[in-house]
Amino acid sequence: MPQTYFYLNGPSDPYFPEQELIRLDQAGYTVALSRVAIDHVQQCVGTEERTALNGLLRRAAPGDELVVLDLSSLGSGARDVLATLQKCRKEKIAVRCIEFGQMDLASHPESQAIKMLEAVVRLEAQTRSERSSTSLKRAQESGRPTGRPGSLSPQDREEVIELLAKDVSISEIARRFGTSRQTIMRIRASTAVPATEDGKSGD
């Protein structure tokens, strides 16, 4: 027989989750405490780290339903919420959110709510990409360094330059400092340390 599970996430205080349970009752649900899962994590914490929610989803079977009070219970952002709903959809677990009424957010075919979340995720991705491009362009125009920061400290760089001047090979220096040959080669290029005739520093 299909079961109805409830998931709540909120602070650890004397008023939680009594008020939330009252809201579920007012929405017409008969809440069995044995089927209630509760997390006490901040909203910014993703679903992977919501222990009670993951345990509940492992416990639920196809045909069961998950009830939450609001969309934030399902993840830390649009992408996270969408991933949770897609997982439930794949496992054939219905998801009902009180703030959205009685519709199954994980239904087949996709609900309008899912389509809206997908659109929001695409919008967020485009916005991040545009912000990144704009920041990179501004940095280049102002002459600020771009790309990945150097993997070596200023002191390490000085030691690398000294080793290069002593004709220690690039491969050996990279091994000593646990970095890549490309990093050492960039340092050599930036300091104009020439390769020796026997090619040691250019190894």
Image (spheres, grey):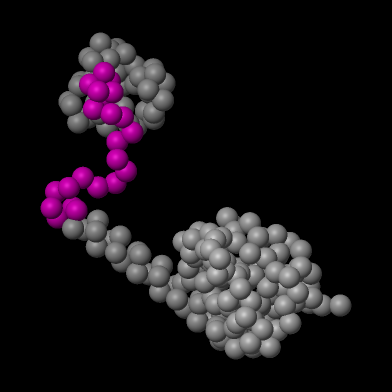
Q: Is residue 203 left or right of residue 100?
A: left
Image location (x, y in percent) of residue 121: 46, 72
Image location (x, y in percent) of residue 120: 45, 76
Residue at the image point whose x is 57% and y is 69% from the top: 16
Res. 193 image quadrant? top left
Q: Is residue 142 left or right of residue 34?
A: left
Res. 122 image quadrant? bottom left
Residue 30 visible in the snapshot: yes
Task: Please tell me whether residue 144 belongs to the stretch shown in magenta.
Answer: yes
Image location (x, y in percent) of residue 186: 27, 32
Image location (x, y in percent) of residue 61: 79, 69
Residue 66 vertical position relative to residue 42 in the rendered view, above or below: below
Q: Which residues make up the magenta segment? A: 139-160
Residue at the image point whose x is 37% and y is 22% from the top: 177
Extreme residue in the front direction: 14
Quick one: quadrant of the C terminus? top left
Q: Choose between 145 and 13: the one closer to the eye.
A: 13
